[in-house]
């Protein structure tokens, strides 16, 4: 069974495996791990060393053999900025479920955690997420960039758009997304 390493667990053994997995396998910072688990940074540092022997078990618990859970190109903890993002969600066969265009002023990890929880609750078997691009919109509200990009892709990928800014079974090219948002902001 697949377990999501980006949700907060109550079970102590699971949380220890989670710390080791996030630190050693996904190479997240102790600050990012602290934000995910709720542990203090000092506890994360201690557990990352003390429970390193749990890494093999943690990998089996949190990932399927051929998939890592998340790929990212940004600081997952950055917040307080107008951001437009492109996330891609994949199933157990590494097939794209959908591309998601969105905005946030909060931490990307918080937004990602909400997205994963919401879509799993809706019945999607999400096994991998790529955080493809996060663009700081500066003083311009990110909703403008999001609306511009959505309008472009709704026209380009007719019939693929679903509410909540998703493009079903569409792998939006990251370069194209970046070019569109930067063009809008210029």
Image: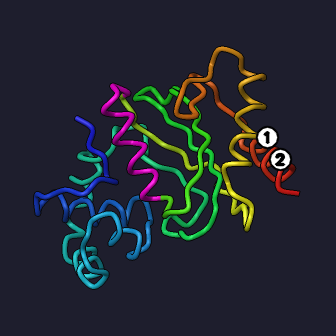
Q: Which mark is residue 95?
A: none
User: Could you tell me residue 81's position as x and y percent?
Assistant: 61, 67
**Nearer the observer, 96 or 27:** 96
Q: Main secondary structure of the magenta part?
A: helix
Q: Is 81 on the left-hand or right-hand side of 58?
A: right
At x 41%, y 69%, the residue is 32
Image: magenta residue range: 109-124
List the residue tagged with mark 1. Answer: 176
Q: Residues within 10 Å of mark 2 (few under 14, many from 20)?
A: few
Which residue occupies the foreground of this view, 51 or 103?
A: 103
Q: CA distance from mark 1 to mark 2?
A: 5 Å
Residue 134 percent location from the top left of the image: 64, 56
Residue appearing at x 39%, y 36% in the figure:
127
Residue occupying image coordinates x 20% and y 66%: 53
Horizontal arrangement in the rendering, residue 64 relative to residue 15 (left or right): right
State whether residue 146 is above or below residue 7: above
Quadrant of res 172:
top right
Vertical order, 101 against 34 (above or below) = above
Element type at mark 2: helix
Foreground pick, 11 / 151: 151
C-beta proximity under 8 Å, tags 1 and 2: yes
Q: Position of residue 14 (x, y in %)?
A: 16, 57
**Residue under pointer 2:** 179
Q: Residues within 10 Å of mark 1 (few under 14, many from 20)?
A: few
Question: Is the N terminus in the top left, top right, bottom left or bottom right quadrant?
Answer: top left
Identify the element where label 1 is drawn. Answer: helix
Determine the residue positioned at 30% across, 46% down: 4
From the viewer's perspective, is 92 left or right of 88? left
Q: Position of residue 76 (x, y in %)?
A: 50, 63
């Amino acid at each position: 069974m697949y377990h999501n390493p980006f949700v907060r667990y109550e079970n102590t053994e699971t949380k220890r495996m989670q710390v080791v997995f996030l630190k050693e396998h996904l190479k997240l910072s102790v600050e990012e791990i602290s934000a995910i688990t709720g542990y203090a940074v000092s506890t994360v540092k201690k557990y990352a060393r003390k429970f390193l022997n749990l890494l093999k078990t943690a990998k089996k618990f949190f990932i399927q053999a051929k998939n890592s859970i998340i790929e990212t190109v940004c600081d997952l903890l950055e917040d307080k900025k107008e951001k437009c993002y492109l996330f891609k969600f994949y199933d157990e066969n590494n097939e794209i479920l959908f591309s998601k265009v969105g905005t946030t002023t909060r931490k990307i990890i918080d937004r990602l955690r909400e997205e994963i929880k919401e879509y799993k609750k809706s019945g999607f078997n999400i096994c991998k997420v790529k955080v493809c691009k996060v663009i700081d919109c500066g003083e311009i509200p990110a909703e403008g960039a999001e609306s511009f990009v959505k309008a472009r892709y709704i026209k380009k990928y007719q019939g693929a758009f679903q509410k909540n800014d998703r493009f079903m079974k569409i792998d939006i090219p990251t370069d194209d997304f970046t070019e569109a948002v930067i063009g809008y902001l210029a």
